[in-house]
Image: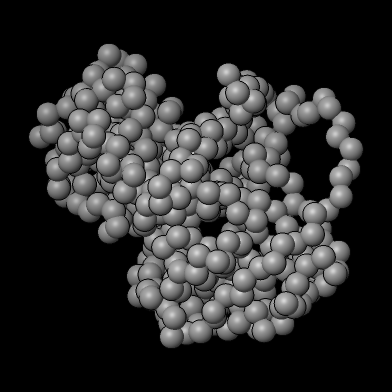
């Protein structure tokens, strides 16, 4: 077993982050200089699309549990907020145990987004015959409109619902998902890759964190849980860069490494793997839970995201709007960047430019706001103009 596998096993068994902290004292090494970075061609006429997706936020965190609905065993797997892609393999693994624990070997999955596809594949790997029932398929599902980065704490749950038990569960989901995503590295189309990300600030980082919290309160957002305390980070620790080793026009610069998901290639890969493994897909629309009785499988997985609000009456679900502006791809731009009013993610299918809108939390408005994307692009353009060669 490789080092990654050993680390994953250790993390999965751990009750707290301290239990698995490294026993090795590593010497501090030199901060490597920033390599030459290509500038983003930040012009509004290079937008190729603007899209809006709705994150299915649940104040208590994702619902991963089984219940009886008539004669069906329904295993719920929804409500991941902004952490859906990141936690998909982890919650899916728990769902497999719940779904197959009764001996079922034919399972129906309701929903074909990130959660539905990954859960279906995990069920297949466990030996189940799987059919996906869904109204839409990628790229028409809301998961296709995600930012596409490893973000397992993004709007996971409210601070008031944070408990040690939920934290340990979250840590297990993280470890499983993180390991599964590594198996997509190096594949054609780069469905998953690691990139360096640079964060810029005009004020010290502690002060910036307080400013962001104040801005979130002004936007009407509640206080979200910070689950990082429950497990050591699965990504390298960020490092502060001194002036002169980076090209950015900012007094405070941090560099970190993170996974980026090329959602176009990743979704297609998941779909292809599912079908090659013998999976079936049927286009179906369900309005009430009672309609599931007509399906032939006795065990079903509910991966409908926000759809569970109507289908299963979960009124705790809250939509969180997220808009993306996507620029023409620039293969030479292989780094991520964020600063005041913008973030940029370098995906193979385009450079994703994004900002936090004033009306995101609780909004189900799917209409793109061009001014929002152009505002983020303008902030990015200012940084590009100030970059040193």
The quadrant in which residue 35 appears is bottom right
- Residue 71 seen anywhere in this rendered image of the structure: yes
Instruction: Estimate the x, y position of residue 93 in percent, counting from the top left.
Output: 43, 28
Way the structure is coloured: one colour
Q: Residue at x 64, y 25 (%)?
A: 3
Which image quadrant: the N terminus? top right
Residue 349 pos. (x, y %): 41, 63
Q: Nearer the viewer, residue 352 or 205?
A: 352
How many marks are shown on the rendered structure? Answer: 0
- In this view, the residue in front, 305 or 86, is 86
Left or right of residue 176, residue 4 in this image: right
182 sits to left or right of 31 = left
Residue closest to the eye, 376 or 302: 376
Quarter that holds the C terminus: bottom right
Residue that appears at 52% across and 53% down:
260
| Residue 228 against residue 123 in the figure, above or below | below
Q: x%, y% of residue 346?
A: 53, 63
Q: Residue 223 in the image: x percent, y percent? A: 63, 56
Residue drawn at 67 percent across, 35 percent down = 231
Camera sees residue 304: no
Rendering quarter of residue 289: top left
> For residue 142, what is the image quadrant?
bottom left
360 w.r.t. 238: above or below? below
Q: Residue at x 66, y 68 (%)?
A: 37
8 vs 134: above or below? above
User: Residue at the top extreme?
Assistant: 103
């Amino acid at each position: 077993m490789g080092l990654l596998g050993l680390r994953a096993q250790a993390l999965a068994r751990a009750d707290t982050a301290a239990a698995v902290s490294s026993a090795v004292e590593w010497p501090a090494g030199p901060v490597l200089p920033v390599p030459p970075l290509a500038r983003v061609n930040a012009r509004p006429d290079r937008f190729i699309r603007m899209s809006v997706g709705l994150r299915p936020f649940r104040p208590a965190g994702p619902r991963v549990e089984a219940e009886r609905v008539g004669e069906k065993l329904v295993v719920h797997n929804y409500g991941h907020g902004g952490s859906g892609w990141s936690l998909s393999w982890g919650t899916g693994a728990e769902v497999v145990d719940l779904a197959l624990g009764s001996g079922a070997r034919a399972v129906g999955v309701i929903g074909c987004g990130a959660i539905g596809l990954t859960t279906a594949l995990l069920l297949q790997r466990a030996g189940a015959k799987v059919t996906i029932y869904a109204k839409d398929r990628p790229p028409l599902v809301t998961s296709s409109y995600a930012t596409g980065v490893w973000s397992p704490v993004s709007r996971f749950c409210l601070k008031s619902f944070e408990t040690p038990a939920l934290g340990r569960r979250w840590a297990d989901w993280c470890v499983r998902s993180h390991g599964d995503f590594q198996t997509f590295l190096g594949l054609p189309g780069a469905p998953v890759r690691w990139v360096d990300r640079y964060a810029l600030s005009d004020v010290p980082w502690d002060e910036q964190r307080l400013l962001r919290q104040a801005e979130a309160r002004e936007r009407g957002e509640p206080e979200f849980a910070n689950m990082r305390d429950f497990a050591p980070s699965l990504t390298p620790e960020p490092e502060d860069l001194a002036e002169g080793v980076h090209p950015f026009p900012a007094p405070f610069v941090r560099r970190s490494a993170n996974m980026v998901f090329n959602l176009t290639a990743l979704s297609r890969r998941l779909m292809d793997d599912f079908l090659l493994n013998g999976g079936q897909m049927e286009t179906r629309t369900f309005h009430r839970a009672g309609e599931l009785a007509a399906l032939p499988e006795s065990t079903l997985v509910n991966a409908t995201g926000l759809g569970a609000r109507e289908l299963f009456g979960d009124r705790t679900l809250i939509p969180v709007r997220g808009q993306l502006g996507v620029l023409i791809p620039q293969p030479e731009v292989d780094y991520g960047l964020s600063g005041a009013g913008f973030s940029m993610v370098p995906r193979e299918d385009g450079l994703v430019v994004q900002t936090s809108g004033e009306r995101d939390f609780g909004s189900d408005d799917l209409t793109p706001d061009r001014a929002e994307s152009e505002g983020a692009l303008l902030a990015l353009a200012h940084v590009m103009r100030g970059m040193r060669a």
